[in-house]
Amino acid sequence: MFSQEFIEKIKTAERLTVLTGAGVSAESGIATFRDPDGLWAQFNPQEMASVDGFMSNPDLVWSWYQYRRETVFKAKPNAGHFAMAEIQDYFDPLTLITQNVDQLHQRAGSENVLELHGNIIENHCLDCGESHDDEIDIQNKEVPVCNFCGGKIRPSVVWFGEMLPEDVLYQAGAASEDCDLFLTIGTSGEVYPAAGLPMIAQDYGAYVVEINPNETVYSNRADEKIMLPFSQAMPMIAEIVKKYRTKV
């Protein structure tokens, strides 16, 4: 199933960096955006995921994200999420970079998670930036206002036209440059700058493995391609890790 070279890398690599995308969450029942029947087939991204769209119809956008939150809260981490969390103490470090906004990795126990696109669990004021989480009622479909400045509260997700969080992007780049082994899992490889991270890792000498049941734009460049879903491949990798490595 896995090449001997990959198994040797699992045994000997000091630093592991992992990039996960929408396919990882899809296995937990969370719809992806780019599938023919995905979320962007139903909604206009500029209306539902941009500052302009939010300001034009804040209650509509807020109610849509409330619906998405309900979907996320009902979803459960899959076997791959738990296997990923199991191996985090066997590498120094394991850096987990995700394009997903659902925090399923954290719910499974992963700790060192870099959220490139933010998340939809947290919220902040559009005007003053103040964080608003605990006081938000998931059932409320009308956009709440900030009790500090009166501004509109929005999800803490990166919208179209916005920059990725600079510190997170810097850490993701550094982890890609500094790793011995890089796994890219469940991502199409089409959304930059995340799509460039496996190439950075490879350019700096890492062994790059793509785990995806589908062919992607990166498949031919990866050092190894494993055509399995995350929930099947990751537990197998975890077993190899626990068999041959000790916790650091």
Image (cartoon, rainbow, N blue to C red):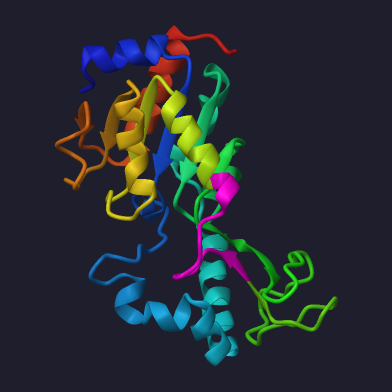
Q: Quadrant of residue 31?
A: bottom left
Residue at 56% from the left image edge and 41% from the top image edge: 113
Residue 118 shows in this picture: yes
Check the image and report above or below for 117 versus 136.
above
- Magenta stretch, residue numbers: 155-168
Residue 223 coordinates in the image, percent (x, y) = 21, 26
Residue at 26% from the left image edge and 65% from the top image edge: 35
Q: Name the foreground residue: 147 vs 71.
A: 147
Of the 4 image quadrants, the one containing the N terminus is: top left
Left or right? Give the position of 112 relative to 196: right
Q: Name the foreground residue: 83 vs 55.
A: 55
Of the 4 image quadrants, the one containing the C terminus is: top right
Residue 211 coordinates in the image, percent (x, y) = 28, 36
Residue 57 shows in this picture: no
Check the image and report above or below for 175 versus 58.
above
Left or right? Give the position of 24 relative to 168: left
